[in-house]
Amino acid sequence: MKGALKGFFAAFFVIFLFNISVLANNPIVKVDDKGNRIYGGDPAALVDGDTVYLYLGQDIGTTGYNMPNYLCYSSKDLINWKYEGIPLKASDFPWGSANDSWAAQVIKYKGKYYYYMCKNSTGISVAVSDSPTGPFVNALGSQKLIDPSWTAGKVSWDDIDPTVWVEEDENGVEKRYMMWGNSNLYIVELNEDMISITDKNNDGRINGSDITELFIEGIPSDSKFTEAPWIYKRDGKYYLFFASNWREELSYATADNIYGPYTYQGIVMRVGASSNTNHPAVIDFQGKTYLFYHTGALEQGHGYRRSVCIDELRFDEEGRVIELVESSIGLDGTAVHIANAKNQNEKIYFSHFENSLKDGEYPMGAFVLAGPLTQHKNDFRWEIVEGKYKLNDGKEYVSIQAVHKMGYYITNYNNHVKLLHDDDASTATAQKQTFIKHTYEDGSIAFESVYSPGKYLTIVDGKIELTGFSEENSKFVLIEQVRFSPYVEVTEEGFRVYGAFKPEGKYALFEVRDKDGNVEYIGVIKSSADGEINYTYAPKQQGEYLIRVGSYKFKVKWGGEE
């Protein structure tokens, strides 16, 4: 086995000398139909046939929320997104501010599309259209679906962020629900017209007595429900995704009944590096589950200028969400290690830091270093993207983004090197975060600063500095990082491992342990030429197992109890 593993690792860390100059996959929407940079947050997604429609509130503020419009994009592959325009405006509703297009959700019901929205905490209402791209028409005029006076006595800002769910109950009776809240969580039933609330107590009036308050049990003492609920159902169980804490993380709870009780299950995504809020939207599309969320990763982005991202959301065998880390490569990007061409054990990374829950600790940053891999392997992952500044002179301009600190780039900082977020979108910052990529006959590359011509990224005593060119320490190679989405299915024969794998024809570590942690098997799985894994392992006996495929871990059972 030792010999086999030695061969495995030699094959696994294959060096690819290739030319990368592409736009990052995340954020997925960056511009409007005219190519103008556009910001927006609070994503909501709708699957309609072979198309996914993405809705967000446009951000045009600088020091506070200024959101006049809702925006719509569409995609058939979740990679390429088409701008569909402005389907609805805050000003389409006569109450509240014309600049408060806060979180919303669109659903399709009996051939029509319903846009459930809020304007800050001044109320919740609904608009209707015959098309998912609008225009949507205010269905209630000056009236509201939810009036804040109905939940008075709690907090004055809790009537926000509606999410809607339609299903048939166990008796085949259709039910329609809307959930919403900040600090407090509420639910009502909707009538079949989708624009009115069910008179729950049959008293002939619609008011607070028709609203049910929900509670999440088991939330840790250092956490809380904040806002942004999203209803999802999987294998008969209700999943409530929501923003927790401040700055905001994404968490989830589960229940067997839509009214609960909901039990807290854990973190979905920890606080991001560039936005003080987050907002989940979860859909199933073409056999997989996806999470939409927002960051402040675009140039001059922050908590009031957000941008929407997507990653695959995965579950273990017991239905628990596998925690995600925000990622610039999203669904189709490529992560690399940047290694010294003369000593590939020396790889560029940034000094580790955890994103803080405290506003006062932002903006954050880090030193850029070089050395062997450490336990913080995500700090070594980079994405080489199209230069934020470029001239039409035939040279290759690139920027170097930290994959898991999205929006943070290697930056010329007073002729030193730091990892920093672009918080001003100035030409100077674009130049400081852009390098000319030089490629040599042996396939190695060097990065020359645009802001300081003649200065190159260079390894100096374990740090990355900007110096004159060094043959020993200014040349690098890019090592492509294998990425894949494995799944484990329990079959009569054992454990079937399957999924997509990039790049094709590569290897992943495969490990099987019993419930006590003892290794039963360790080896490798190789993907096919078309990038697929399909492998079945037969366990030695019935019982619980811990399975590792690459960096993914699963807890599964096979047969009856031991």
Image (cartoon, helix red, strand yellow):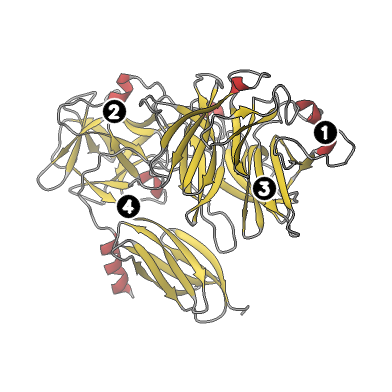
Q: Quadrant of residue 227?
A: top right
Q: Nearer the viewer, mark 1 or mark 4?
A: 1
Circle number at residue 166: 3
Q: Position of residue 437 (x, y in %)?
A: 19, 36
Q: CA distance from mark 3 to mark 1?
A: 20 Å
Q: Nearer the viewer, mark 2 or mark 1?
A: 1
On the rendered image, what quadrant is the N terminus found in?
A: bottom left
* Residue 28, placed above or below residue 314: above
Quick check: 294 left or right of 140? left
Looking at marks 3 and 4 on the same chain, the residue that comes earlier in the sequence is marked by 3
Q: Residue farthest to the right?
A: 203
Looking at marks 2 and 4 on the same chain, the residue that comes earlier in the sequence is marked by 2
Q: Secondary structure at mark 2?
A: strand
How packed is label 4: few (under 14 Cα within 10 Å), some, or many (20 or more)?
A: some
* Residue 304, placed above or below residue 107: above
Q: CA distance from mark 2 to mark 4?
A: 27 Å
Three-letter residue code for mark 3: Val
Q: CA distance from mark 2 to mark 1?
A: 64 Å
Q: Position of residue 397 (x, y in %)?
A: 22, 32
Residue at label 2? 416
Q: Position of residue 126 (x, y in %)?
A: 66, 31
Residue at label 4? 481
Three-letter residue code for mark 1: Ile
How packed is label 1: few (under 14 Cα within 10 Å), some, or many (20 or more)?
A: some
Q: Residue farthest to the bottom?
A: 540
Q: Secondary structure at mark 3?
A: strand
Q: Nearer the viewer, mark 2 or mark 4?
A: 4
Q: Quadrant of residue 541?
A: bottom right
Quick check: 347 left or right of 181? left
Residue at label 1? 206
Q: CA distance from mark 3 to mark 4?
A: 41 Å
